Image: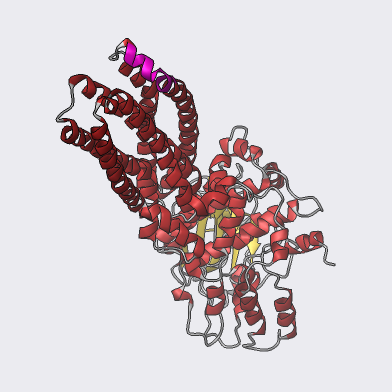
Amino acid sequence: MTDPTARRQAEFAPTQVSADTVDETRGGTGTLGSSFDMSRPPSAQIARIEVGQRLDDFDLLVELGSGAFARVFLARQRSMQRLVAVKISANRGEEGQTLAQLDHDYIVRVFDQRILRDRDWRLLYMQYVPGGTLLDLGRLIFGDERRPESGQALLDAVDVALEARGESRPTESTARAELATLSWPETVAWLGKRLAEALHYANSRGVLHRDIKPANVLLAPDGTPKLADFNISFARNLSGASPFTYFGGSLSYMSPEQLMATRPGHVQDAAMLDTRSDIYSLAVMLWELLTGMKPFDDSAAQAARAESAELVGDTTALDLMLSTRAGGITSEALAALPSDCPTALRRVLLKALSADRDQRWASGAELAEQLQLCLDPQARDLVDPPERSWRLRLRPYFLPIAVPAVVIPNALAAAYTIHHNQLLIVSKLSEQGQDRFMLLTTLLNLLVWPLGIVLAVYSIRYVIFVPRRLRRGPTPPAEALARARHDCLVASERVVFVVIGLWVMSGLTFALILQSVAGGMPGRSAIHFVGSHAVGGAIAIAYPFFLLTFLIVRSIYPELIAQGQTDARDAEQLRALSRRLSRYLAIAASVPLLAIMAVSFLTASEIAEIIVPIRVVCIGGIAAFVFAYWLSRMIESDIQALERVILQARISERRVPS
């Protein structure tokens, strides 16, 4: 039986570094690596550079990393009197121009480059980030048998790196204060959200990373991640080369389509990759950070690689890796997730790790929004309720629940109105008139109310059918999801408008039938009629609104939010729904008041006739108002939680220049 702890240790153990990567085992400072042309080996003179030398404007202080194509030093820039990381490589490609255009909080800032034409060298100087890398973090926190429990593990690892470099720990930092309060899964989501924002920003500038791995994520002193080493290139046309030569340890983080692009002779090449490939790689890294092991077991591929190390062009190991990823996440990998891992985080990572890129998150912004949701306990509980939650179990039965939620209050309201009018109006008609009145009103109700149900269901059809299609797969188009989200937030009011129309129609018809049967409606009868309809209408409007809204906001709408693709309109629609709550709460409060007001127009004998239903309405109305108020507070709290997630995503998007 395999020891999971042993496997965790193996994942972060130092390994032989491939020729194209900056040395990941030396210091772990997380400097930029292999973003350059690999068509020629570096000058032998680069290998002879020593600490203490001056190159152009830079005094080289400490070597941070080295590889076959570049060396990276901590240096002091004389002209600016600042510490920078300087990567020295052959002057090939357009790396400097590509990286210098990226200016984001979670991307290592490349300041500029210097070209030493006499030596044909490029000096690319960039922001120095002293907190180590995620590779250092993984080796430190998974170095023993204990799992990390909180974000403090991240801060402790950063402090170790800072101390090793003679850097001081920040005394006041909101990021560190926040991290200290997070569980370890929440810490992983916190890191992932920021890296997803970085990918979204880079993609908006036409830049893909293509080599996301722990060694390429640096940590600032406050624990903030910064993505390094953008725009890595590779060449499949070099004689005697293989994908492993170019990507080394990075292969295990690659998406299936990127692995396929490295396969000699395959029609797909790296130019066909898009941001979804980077999203996949980020998810692999986050899974490894969460569990201590990668989501896919590549032991067979590693064995095949060892056996065919001398064979040029052998793709056995690559084929095994592709087959493993096509099979999806195994039960063993799922069992490695921490017990306190939120269901939302599991769902987000599994979607990002889909072998079919069309099934992944479409952008870094979508992934960032979903990871932000994982950081909000209330929001994530709404979107991904516990397995035994009633909210999850009732989702397939929205229509059978929604219909009674509307019909029952309307039936109670109609019963009160009919009883009230029967005692004070209809009973005053002749026996023949009463029979005719009852026949006509019964026929009318049998026609109008089923029609009303059909209209109400049609008005919220997207709320019914899009989630149903979502559960049965495949994912509906973005336009259908957006329409369903919008309709969810106006569904209750649409149903209310249908109900209002029915009550107005029934009121007018009642008057017309009474005109036909009795030749008109006396003044006092009109007062009784208006009063009873006001009470019944308030009951029929307010209570269905709160019942439907509660059901939708707590169960149906979050299911759509889980698909991502929200925008600023969703936040505004949530705020609009929040504003409508007070309006309908006032209507609910008016029920007992309207009943009491109606009594004031009655004579003593009339009051005696209907005192029982009036008492029922008043007492029941007060109890129902308390219930409606409780529902409104619950709905308001849910709206605020969902709005927080959407607004955070919009804030991230605003960081991307148009």
Residue 108 vertical position relative to residue 631 in the rendered view, above or below:
below
* Residue at left offset 18%, top offset 20%: 523
In screen coordinates, is 395 left or right of 44?
A: left
Question: Residue 24: x percent and y percent?
Answer: 67, 62
The answer to whether residue 538 is left or right of residue 352 is left
Q: Residue at image x 47%, y 39%?
A: 550
The residues colored magenta run: 605-615
Number of marks: 0
Residue 219, how many percent across, how many down? Answer: 61, 49
Instruction: Name the spot of residue 108 as percent of width and height, x first.
Output: 52, 53
Give left or right: position of 603 versus 272: left
Magenta stretch containing residue 611, yes or no?
yes
Is 609 drawn above or below residue 58 in the view shown? above
Q: Could one spot residue 331 in this view of the protein?
A: yes
Report the colour scheme. Answer: secondary structure
Q: Which of 553 and 585 is in front in this view?
A: 585
Q: State the predominant SS element of the stretch in magenta.
A: helix
Identify the residue at horizontal 28%, vertical 37% (top origin): 435
Q: Position of residue 88 (x, y in %)?
A: 55, 64
Where, by quadrant of the figure, is residue 530 drawn? top left
